[in-house]
């Protein structure tokens, strides 16, 4: 019997504080209408729980990883309030009516409950209301189809296959009830750890407050202190887990298509085209038609008679094969997945006890209960079979909202409302939103067993807060429209701010027919997505770039070649994301938080701290406006520089995407390769003088979990009369192949002198001349660039330019 008072019996706030208890960093406020527990989890994390009963609603947190950090907490008592404080904050609790007010270390209010109390219970569940103080901007919220700033919007968290989604469609495939508030340049974040159909409202209902609410489940939220947005993202990902470090090949380009395979040749010819046309690519993807009538973990042997030979052939061409897996299991006696799952009682049921049967690709379909470890282990163990067929250490997991009745909308008889889990507990309201998270974990752990010691690459469509521990994501079924080309930017930027650095949208658009121009512009943008894949619908026109003429093909090749040139940069950023949570693809506001002009920018972005990308998003355009924040910017293509802050209209002909390197840039690059397993040769560092900056170049074998790795720290320090570049002694056990460093210092007049480790360098007459003597330098007056070459011997070096 439930001890809980149903929320529906209530319509009140938590009331007045009667007494307070403290145990270590946990404060218990007993109130007339319930109680609240405040836990100081770490220097930047405060947890708030509340209940109308004696007990907090018990729940398993699927999102959090049990993080806590020691922190010294002080308390002070005043007549009508108690103040709980630590280094980064002061939290005032009003006693006559339990309400919270959060101050930052400079004593400015950053978050405040409504004076009547921040928590309201009603027949709709609970709602926490925070006063809108004026100039808030809101970010995060996971995968939502809108612009970057969420002010004035309202969202529901209910994992839904909304294949026909468009701008403003809500809810979508994923749920991350986390948001960042930026006010007067100071950021903090809120995460509601509740898996039910929660709601976030950023002043749409009532412009005097923003709120988060749930119909049921625990009132349990966390506040993350800034002041930087990056502090908030770091704290949120400490609580919910750092993003997995994807294998290096997952940063490579993928070619995909939802299609029927008539023969292996359908796939092999795509692979051959990519190689013959020198469009760099790592992976060809198999969509659902490779299976035997959509039975997961099987092959259609009529087409793929010998999968191992097939994948082996692709491997010899330097391709990985990535296959799709859906959660649903075909109801089919004699099919091992069905038989084993039924025998062990692993599938979702109906209240009556019978199996829940839905309608998906295989027809009648049953669903594994991924909330149970033994079910995850069983499903995950099947990946060994795929591995034996030579598919890569990866899984593309789709339809895991779970999607149902794909044919013509959800039918009454397939409703999941009264579904129970495999042990008879109510399922949909509580567990729907974490279904994909469980599936991602199953795939992750299964692949870890199938490929011991290696990092899996999971690509998921659905998810819940915390899934970044296991998977990357793509934004599902977008369409081949200019609007959706743009929409991918704010969606991916907000995903990055929500702890999901590794994400992408289908290049060219999934649904509908793309046009040559749209596809070309999409390649230019998509080559900068953290996850970069051309994918399209079976009902749409084929989308391989060479089908659209030479000009489009050239754009695809150039775009992907640039991405592969930048691979060492992307890889180092992916590593940083996995330890800090800071995304690879960043909104301007993350890098320029003190510049209000960046707060709503979602038509341009940065990759890491140094590369600013301003794609063309309009049909027929040959130029666009770009905002340059304060500082110096170097045009990637022309080498000319621009002083910010200013907005400029820049040229963007069909074959060129505007890209700028920030003053201070240190960008590790390498030669263009056709797949990421090829050696990139010399470590070429693009240096753009400006202030001081550092870059850590991370390298390893690209796939191992805890194998040897190394870090090379490069710094630059520039003033009017000099540029100093230092390389620290290489740290770590990984030894890169023999190579040189090539420094390309941009935007320079001819230096008066160039020294390495105190010795003046001989000057070569061409860049090719650099090959002969080492170290040496070459000044290119056409591009205002100084080239320096020296052997990478693992030791520290210092380059000094007198200007
Ligand atoms: O009902 O596997 O979003 O990328 O190609 C459609 C077929 C099922 C939806 C995915 C899409 C994929 C398609 N899937």
Image: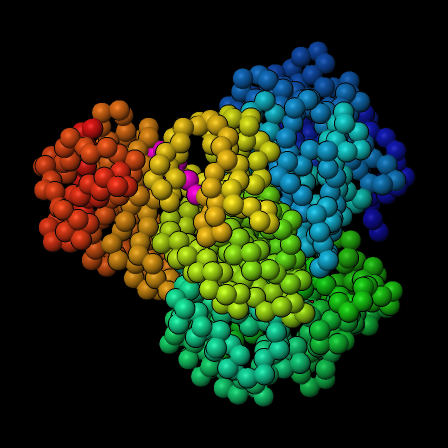
The reply, left or right, for residue 471 in relation to residue 22 is: left
Residue 725 or residue 748, whichever sits in front:
748
Q: Splitting the image into 4 quarters, where does residue 421 fall?
A: bottom right
Q: How many marks?
A: 0
Tell me if residue 662 is in the magenta stretch. yes
Residue at 58% across, 39% down: 602
Whereabouts is ligand 1, in terms of quadrant?
Answer: bottom right
Tell me if residue 73 is in the magenta stretch. no
Question: From this viewpoint, which residue is outermost toward the top?
Answer: 79
Extent of the magenta region? 659-666
Residue at 82% across, 72% down: 354
Q: Splitting the image into 4 quarters, where does residue 509 fall?
A: bottom right
Estimate the x, y position of residue 529 in percent, counting from the top left: 50, 51
Estimate the x, y position of residue 63 in percent, counting from the top left: 62, 48
Estimate the x, y position of residue 381 in percent, counting from the top left: 55, 72
Q: Is residue 506 in view? A: no
Question: From this viewpoint, which residue is outermost toward the right?
Answer: 9
Estimate the x, y position of residue 596 in percent, counting from the top left: 56, 26
**Is 228 located above or below residue 529 in the figure?**
above
What sort of colour scheme is used for the picture?
Answer: rainbow
Residue 732 or residue 657, whichever sits in front:
657
Q: Is residue 634 in view? A: yes
Residue at 77% across, 57% down: 428
The reply, left or right, for residue 394 in relation to residue 717 is: right
**Is 260 located above or below residue 674 in the figure?**
below
The reply, left or right, for residue 516 in relation to residue 512 is: left
Secondary structure character of the magenta stretch overall? strand
Q: Quadrant of the C terminus?
A: top left
**Is 122 located above or below residue 446 in the figure?**
above
Residue 802 or residue 132, whichever sits in front:
802
């Amino acid at each position: 019997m439930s001890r809980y008072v149903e929320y529906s019996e209530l319509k009140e706030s938590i009331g007045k504080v009667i007494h307070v208890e403290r145990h270590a960093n946990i404060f218990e406020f007993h109130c007339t209408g319930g109680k609240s527990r405040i836990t100081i989890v770490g220097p930047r994390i405060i947890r708030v729980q509340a209940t109308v009963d004696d007990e907090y609603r018990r729940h398993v947190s699927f999102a959090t990883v049990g993080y806590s950090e020691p922190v010294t907490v002080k308390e002070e008592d005043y007549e009508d309030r108690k103040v709980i404080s630590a280094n980064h904050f002061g939290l005032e609790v009003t006693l006559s009516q339990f309400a919270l007010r959060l101050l930052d270390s400079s004593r400015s209010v950053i978050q405040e409950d409504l004076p009547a109390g921040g928590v309201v219970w009603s027949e709709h569940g609970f709602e926490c209301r925070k006063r809108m103080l004026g100039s808030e901007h809101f970010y995060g919220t996971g995968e939502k189809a809108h612009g970057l700033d969420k002010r004035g919007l309202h969202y529901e968290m209910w994992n839904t296959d909304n294949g026909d989604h468009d701008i403003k469609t809500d809810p979508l495939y994923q749920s991350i009830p986390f948001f960042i508030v930026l006010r007067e340049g100071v950021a903090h974040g809120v995460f509601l750890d509740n898996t039910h159909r929660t709601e976030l409202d950023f002043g749409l209902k009532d412009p005097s407050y923003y709120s988060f609410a749930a119909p049921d489940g625990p009132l349990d939220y966390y506040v993350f202190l800034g002041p930087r947005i990056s502090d908030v993202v770091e704290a949120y990902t400490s609580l919910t887990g750092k993003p997995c470090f994807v294998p290096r090949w997952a940063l490579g380009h993928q070619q995909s298509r939802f299609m029927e395979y008539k023969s292996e040749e359908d796939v092999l010819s795509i692979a051959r085209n990519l190689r013959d046309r020198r469009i760099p690519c790592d992976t060809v993807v198999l969509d659902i038609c490779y299976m035997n009538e959509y039975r997961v973990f099987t092959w259609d042997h009529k087409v793929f008679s010998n999968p191992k030979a097939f994948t082996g052939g692709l491997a010899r061409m330097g391709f990985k094969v990535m296959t799709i897996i859906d959660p649903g299991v075909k109801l089919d006696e004699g099919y091992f997945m069905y038989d084993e799952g039924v025998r062990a009682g692993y599938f979702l049921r109906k209240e009556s006890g019978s199996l829940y049967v839905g309608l998906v690709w295989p027809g009648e379909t049953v669903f594994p209960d991924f909330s149970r470890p033994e079910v995850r282990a069983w499903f995950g163990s099947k990946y060994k079979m795929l591995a034996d067929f030579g598919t890569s250490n990866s899984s593309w997991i789709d339809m895991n909202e779970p999607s149902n009745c794909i044919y013509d909308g959800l039918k009454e008889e397939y409703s999941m409302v009264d579904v129970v889990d495999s042990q008879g507990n109510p399922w949909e309201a509580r567990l729907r939103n974490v279904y994909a998270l469980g599936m991602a974990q199953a795939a992750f752990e299964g692949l870890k067993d199938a490929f011991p010691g290696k990092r899996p690459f999971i690509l998921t469509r659905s998810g819940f807060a915390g899934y970044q521990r296991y998977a990357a994501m793509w934004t599902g079924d977008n369409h081949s429209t200019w609007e959706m080309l743009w929409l991918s930017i704010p969606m991916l930027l907000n995903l990055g701010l929500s702890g999901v650095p590794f994400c992408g949208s289908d290049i060219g658009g999934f649904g509908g027919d793309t046009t040559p121009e749209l596809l070309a512009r999409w390649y230019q943008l998509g080559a900068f997505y953290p996850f970069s894949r051309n994918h399209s619908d079976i009902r749409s026109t084929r989308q391989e770039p060479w089908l659209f003429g030479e000009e489009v093909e050239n754009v695809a090749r150039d775009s992907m070649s640039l991405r592969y040139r930048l691979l060492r940069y992307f890889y180092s950023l992916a590593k940083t994301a996995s330890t800090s949570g800071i995304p690879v693809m960043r909104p301007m506001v993350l890098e320029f938080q003190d510049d209000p002009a960046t707060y709503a920018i979602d038509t341009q972005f940065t990759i890491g701290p140094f590369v600013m990308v301003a794609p063309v998003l309009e049909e027929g355009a040959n130029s666009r406006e770009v905002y340059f924040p304060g500082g110096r910017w170097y045009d990637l293509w022309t080498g000319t520089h621009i002083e910010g802050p200013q907005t400029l209209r820049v040229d963007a002909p069909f074959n060129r995407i505007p890209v700028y390197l920030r003053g201070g840039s240190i960008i590790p690059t390498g030669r263009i390769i056709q797949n990421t397993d090829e050696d990139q040769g010399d470590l070429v560092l693009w240096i753009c003088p400006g202030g001081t900056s550092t870059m850590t170049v991370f390298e390893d074998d690209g796939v191992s979990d805890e194998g040897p790795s190394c870090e090379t720290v490069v710094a630059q320090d520039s003033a009017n009369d000099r540029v100093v570049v230092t390389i620290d002694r290489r740290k770590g056990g990984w030894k890169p192949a023999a190579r040189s460093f090539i420094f390309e210092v941009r935007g320079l007049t001819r230096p008066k002198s160039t020294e390495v480790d105190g010795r003046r360098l001989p000057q070569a007459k061409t860049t090719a001349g650099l090959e002969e003597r080492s170290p040496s330098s070459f000044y290119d007056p056409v591009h205002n660039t100084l080239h320096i070459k020296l052997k990478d011997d693992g030791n520290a070096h210092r380059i000094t330019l007198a200007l």
